[in-house]
Image (cartoon, rainbow, N blue to C red):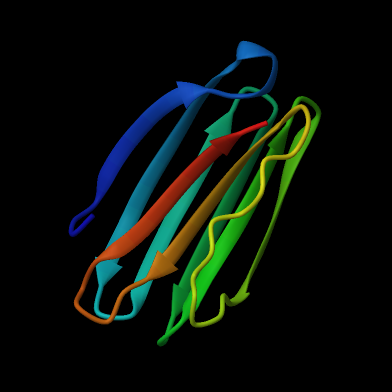
Amino acid sequence: MTEPVTIRFKGPTGVAVTLDVTEVGPNEVAYAVKSPKSQSKGSARGPGQGCITVLRANGSGNSCGGVGNDRARPSPRADAVVIQAVTGEDGTAILDIISG
């Protein structure tokens, strides 16, 4: 993706989730995730950086940092949705949404 966007999808147990990508630029990405029971924000700046947010029925958690050179997609997790946002040198962001 190359610009801010809003994505709606069903999270764990079918609840509505909104993912707002708020910033996209060279080596930069920021987003906010909202569901009825939780909110989470993530942002990463710099080459090879990214964030992972894990949504579960009872809440969410996230971590940000280096994602390595291969930028591998995260593995599915039981009863969870995993979101990974990775910075791109060319002003793009790579976004993966994986349901378990």
Q: Position of residue 68 (x, y in %)?
A: 56, 80
Q: Position of residue 12 (x, y in %)?
A: 67, 22
Say which quadrant the C terminus sits in.
top right
Residue found at the far top of this picture: 14
Q: Position of residue 53 (x, y in %)?
A: 63, 51
Query: Does residue 64 sit above or below 94 in this rendering?
Result: below
The mark total stands at 0
Query: Does residue 39 sit above or below 70 in this rendering?
Result: above
Q: Position of residue 62 (x, y in %)?
A: 68, 56
**Residue at screen point 81% across, 28% down:** 58
| Nearer the observer, 63 or 100 | 100
Query: Does residue 18 sit above or below 89 in this rendering?
Result: above
**Residue at screen point 63% across, 22% down:** 36
| Nearer the observer, 25 or 92 | 92
Say which quadrant the N terminus sits in.
bottom left
**Residue at screen point 56% across, 75% down:** 67
**Residue at screen point 36% across, 59% down:** 94
Judge left or right: residue 40 versus residue 4.
right
Judge left or right: residue 52 versus residue 71.
right
Quarter of the image holding residue 64?
bottom right
Judge left or right: residue 23 versus residue 8.
left
